[in-house]
Image: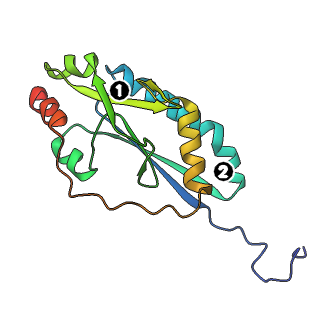
């Protein structure tokens, strides 16, 4: 019979892991280089922090969602492709976009996709460090209060994309 290491009756029971929910929202990972590179950076970042977070009592869950319809865009309040959210919070501090030839080819029109800003430099896919820092900030940054967002309206840019895809 093993003895418990503390005085509480339940301290030796495994504690449930606290969830870290990461959403990866994108228009296309088959053609779009930005979406492909963002997915790879996200996978690398999650691999880098998962062991430490697991040891600290967290469980990382990644939800990858291909936004293929207006309805999905509205459901997820999708503002730009690609998007990464940690526990519902977009990891990008500001929304910047530039012309994405890949998505433009997919829909036959000019489409802008997200540009990531990290340490004052713009990238077409997020550096792994940006994602790792965003995950750790969400977990250890204290109680961040989510700003109230105005009612969602599908951005014109996404309207152009979905119209072109039809």
Q: Residues within 10 Å of mark 2 (few under 14, many from 20)?
A: some
With 114 as the anchor, is 10 left or right in this view? right
Q: Quadrant of residue 117?
A: top left
Position in image of residue 134 (x %, y %): 54, 45
Position in image of residue 34 (x %, y %): 38, 24
Foreground pick, 148 / 54: 148
- Label 2 residue SS: helix
View extreme (front): residue: 120
Q: Which mark is residue 62?
A: none
- Label 1 residue SS: loop
The quadrant in which the N terminus is found is bottom right
Q: Is residue 40 above or below residue 74?
A: above
Q: Which mark is residue 53?
A: 2
Position in image of residue 25 (x %, y %): 35, 40
Position in image of residue 133 (x %, y %): 58, 42
Among the two numbered marks 2 and 1 on one chain, the one whose residue lies closer to the N terminus: 1
Task: State the residue at coordinates (29%, 28%).
Answer: 113
- What residue is pinned by disc 1? 29
Task: State the residue at coordinates (21%, 53%).
Answer: 152
The quadrant in which the C terminus is found is top left
Is residue 1 in view? no
Q: Is residue 28 above or below residue 48?
A: above
Task: State the residue at coordinates (66%, 51%).
Answer: 53
With 40 as the anchor, is 109 left or right in this view? left
Foreground pick, 113 / 63: 113
Q: Is residue 145 above or below residue 126?
A: below
Is residue 126 in view? yes
Q: Is residue 142 above or below residue 84?
A: below
């Amino acid at each position: 019979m093993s003895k418990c290491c503390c005085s509480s009756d339940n301290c030796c029971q495994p504690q449930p892991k606290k969830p870290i929910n990461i959403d990866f929202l994108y228009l296309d990972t088959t053609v779009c280089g930005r979406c492909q590179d963002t997915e790879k950076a996200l996978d690398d970042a999650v691999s880098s922090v998962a062991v430490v977070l697991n040891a600290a009592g967290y469980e990382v869950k990644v939800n990858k969602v291909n936004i293929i319809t207006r309805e999905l865009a509205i459901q997820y309040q999708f503002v730009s492709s690609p998007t990464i959210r940690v526990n519902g919070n977009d990891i990008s501090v500001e929304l910047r976009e530039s012309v994405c030839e890949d998505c433009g080819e997919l829909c036959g029109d000019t489409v802008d996709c997200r540009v990531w800003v990290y340490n004052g430099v713009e990238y077409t896919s997020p550096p792994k460090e940006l994602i790792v820092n965003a995950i750790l900030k969400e977990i250890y940054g204290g109680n961040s209060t989510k700003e109230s967002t105005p009612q969602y309206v599908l951005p014109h840019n996404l309207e152009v994309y979905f119209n072109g895809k039809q």
